[in-house]
Amino acid sequence: MKLCCVQLFHAGVLEDVLLIRRAKTASFDADRSIDVQLLCGGGPDRTEAYLAAHRSEEARSALDRLVRCEAAGDFDGFSPAGPSAGYTAYYA
């Protein structure tokens, strides 16, 4: 499941954000293994704008979690290129 989320992250398509979130929240183990940064393949700012405009409860919940994670420092120095290189090396 994580590998599929990594592939969607690499595509950077905003419409996939909620699909990745559904995978992440499918179970306790999935939530722990699928990094929250995988929601932001299109970049944190674009992802937050997409979620804010989506108007569903699921999108609001995802946005709330991203905001909390940002406040906790989980996105300090983040750009999609960083995790992308790491995942590419790991799964190669």
Image (tube, rainbow, N blue to C red):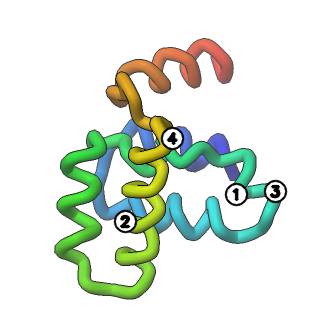
Q: Earlier in the sequence, mark 3 or mark 2?
A: 3
Task: Give residue 15's quadrant in the image.
Answer: bottom left
Amino acid type of the residue tagged 1 in the rendering: Asp
Q: Which residue is mark 4?
A: 7
Looking at the image, is mark 2 or mark 4 nearer the viewer? 2
Q: Position of residue 41 (x, y in %)?
A: 36, 41
Question: Is residue 5 visible to us here?
Answer: yes
Q: Earlier in the sequence, mark 2 or mark 1?
A: 1
Question: Is residue 8 visible to us here?
Answer: no
Amino acid type of the residue tagged 2 in the rendering: Leu
Q: Which residue is mark 3?
A: 29
Amino acid type of the residue tagged 3 in the rendering: Asp
Identify the mark at residue 72; answer none if there is no mark.
none
Figure quadrant of the C terminus: top right
Q: Which residue is mark 2?
A: 63
State the separation of the CA atoms marked 1 and 4: 17 Å
Q: Residue at x 40, y 59 (%)?
A: 17
